[in-house]
Image (tube, rainbow, N blue to C red):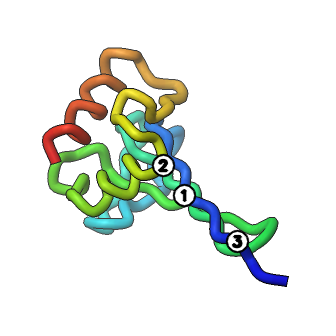
Amino acid sequence: MTFLARKSTYRIESAPTGRARCRRCREAVAKGDLRVAITAFVRPGRSTVLFRCARPDCIDAAFVNAMLATYGSPDAVPAANVVPAEAQRVRAMFSMS
């Protein structure tokens, strides 16, 4: 049986705690700060969640291209527990990268 790879999914959210670290800069994402959660599918029935800071230096072109391959446009990236204006600010960073 072969494993059919699934695309990662992305979500803009507010950090509920200060324990997560950014996958790019390795700094802790403070409680309440905006971040992008990445659900990467490892193998059938298994996934892991990784995070990126919602700062311009942690949102690079390769990251944005992978996200756009999944959603098509920055406006389609879902947001959870975030003020809509803040989510739109993060989506604007996706367009600039």
**Which element type, helix, strand or loop, lies under badge 3?**
loop
- Separation (CA) of disc 2 from disc 3: 16 Å
Vertical order, 39 against 95 (above or below): below
Residue sitting nearer the eye, 77 or 21: 77
Residue type at tag 1: Ser
- Residue ID for mark 1: 8
Q: Position of residue 46 (x, y in %)?
A: 75, 68
Spot occupied by residue 70 in the image (x, y as percentages of width and height): 48, 49
Q: Which amino acid lies under the numbered mark 3 shown in the image of this protein?
A: Leu
- Report x, y in % for residue 1: 85, 83
Residues under numbered marks 2 and 1 in contact, where contact means CB atoms less than 8 Å apart:
yes
Mark 2 crowd level (few <14, some 14–19, many ≥20, 10 Å Cα): some
Calculate the distance from the C-alpha at mark 3 to the C-alpha at mark 1. Answer: 13 Å
Q: Which residue is mark 2?
A: 70
Give the percent coordinates (x, y) of residue 59. 24, 53
Residue annotated with mark 3: 4
Disc 2 and disc 1: Cα gap in Å? 7 Å
Q: Amino acid at mark 2?
A: Thr
Is residue 20 found left or right of 60 in the rendered image? right
> Can the viewer see residue 82 in this picture?
yes
Residue at the image position 57 percent from the left and 63 percent from the top: 40
